Image (cartoon, rainbow, N blue to C red):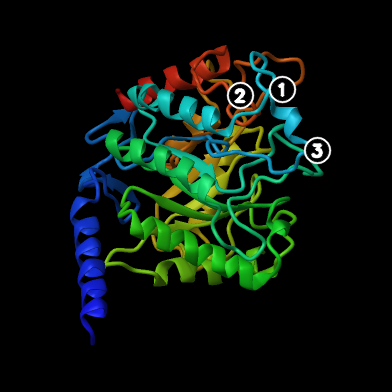
Amino acid sequence: MNHKSLGFFCCFYLFSALSAFTQTPRNTVVSISSDKFYINNELTYSGRSWKGNPIQGLLMNSRMVQGVFDDLNPETVKNWMYSDTKEWDADRNTDEFVSHMAAWKSYGLLSFTINLQGGSPYGYSQSQPWINSAYTESGELRPAYFDRLERILDRADELGMVPIVGLFYFGQDENLADEKAVINAVSEVIDWLHSKDYKNVLIEVNNECNIRYDHAILQPERVHELIELVKSKEKNGYRFLVSTSYGGGAVPKENVVKASDYILLHGNGVKDPNKIIEQVEATRNVNGYRNQPIVYNEDDHFNFDQDLNNFTAAISAYASWGYFDYRMKDEGFEEGYQSVPVDWGINSERKKSFFELMKEITGY
């Protein structure tokens, strides 16, 4: 080896060592023991019960999937412009998201779901002509998306929050060319999360695996393969806890229950709160269930002024619950957390009702 080569390798290893040494120390580690969540080895909501229901070990959350939203389709991006600037601004959206996170946490919100392919900016939609994907066609990462994601995950780590990071959304998965691209995207995301040394992140492979996915590996019969892929990727003995979700009211299939570290349910379409309790019980009876935590991370039913609603029904069955809200027809800007552009504040009556009930339940 000549002197120039030796000098190059010395500089490379010195740079690598300095990078590792100067990486921001992380504050928050999520873990699971039996059916309970822990943050930094302490039970969430430690010692808390509400109306005779244990709250400790649960993970209250909200669907905030548009935190890194962008639209790469020049024909549709005009649909998301802010009223004051008459243009869409992806960085403004993320900055405003980050600015409200501490307020959410102050009410007891310990988790939120964000998705790297977002969710319908209309709440529900059949066609999705917009292009909102953190991946190229071949499954490589788009740096701008991950710059925005890093701002959110860094702030969550500072606050002691546990984001659920979703990797795929139906209606956007077709922007990946093939199964190889899907697998590549999963590997790239998990490698990126490991490279940043995050330990406060839960993974949701895809939102509602049984709804309209183009790629077979994202569908119910095979999605456990991607769960196993996430589980196989360790760094220094640490791996990310992972699951996936199904459409509203569905009970997960055996292959997913067996593979998952925690179980995700959705309450969309479940109008009777008693059916929430039945859904949780049915999930616990699936072959392969081994007392994992059960978490609703999407439910657009409210009635928070009533004693029995989907939120209180879930906790009565010892399941965590997640609020899903969008701007409905003729509603103002302050409504919803999924409709773009998003008001990330707690400024509508519906949002206030959810956060106040959560504060009461969690004792924050």
Of circles 2 and 3, which is in front?
3
- Amino acid at the residue labelled 1: Met
- Which of the 4 quarters of the picture holds residue 184? bottom right
Residue occupying image coordinates x 53% and y 19%: 351
> How far apart are the alpha carbons under marks 2 and 3?
24 Å
Whether the residues at callouts 1 and 2 have beta carbons within 8 Å, the answer is yes
Whether the residues at callouts 2 and 3 have beta carbons within 8 Å, the answer is no
Residue for badge 3: 75
Whether the residues at callouts 3 and 1 have beta carbons within 8 Å, the answer is no
> How far apart are the alpha carbons under marks 3 and 1?
23 Å
- Amino acid at the residue labelled 2: Gly
Neighbours of disc 1 within 10 Å: few (<14), some (14-19), many (20+) = few
Find the residue positioned furthest to the front. 3
Is residue 280 something that shows in the picture? Answer: no
Q: Which mark is residue 336?
A: 2
Residue 239 image position (x, y, % from top left): 34, 63
Residue for badge 1: 328
- Which of the 4 quarters of the picture holds residue 101? top left
Residue 194 image position (x, y, % from top left): 35, 59
| Residue 16 or residue 179, whichever sits in front | 16
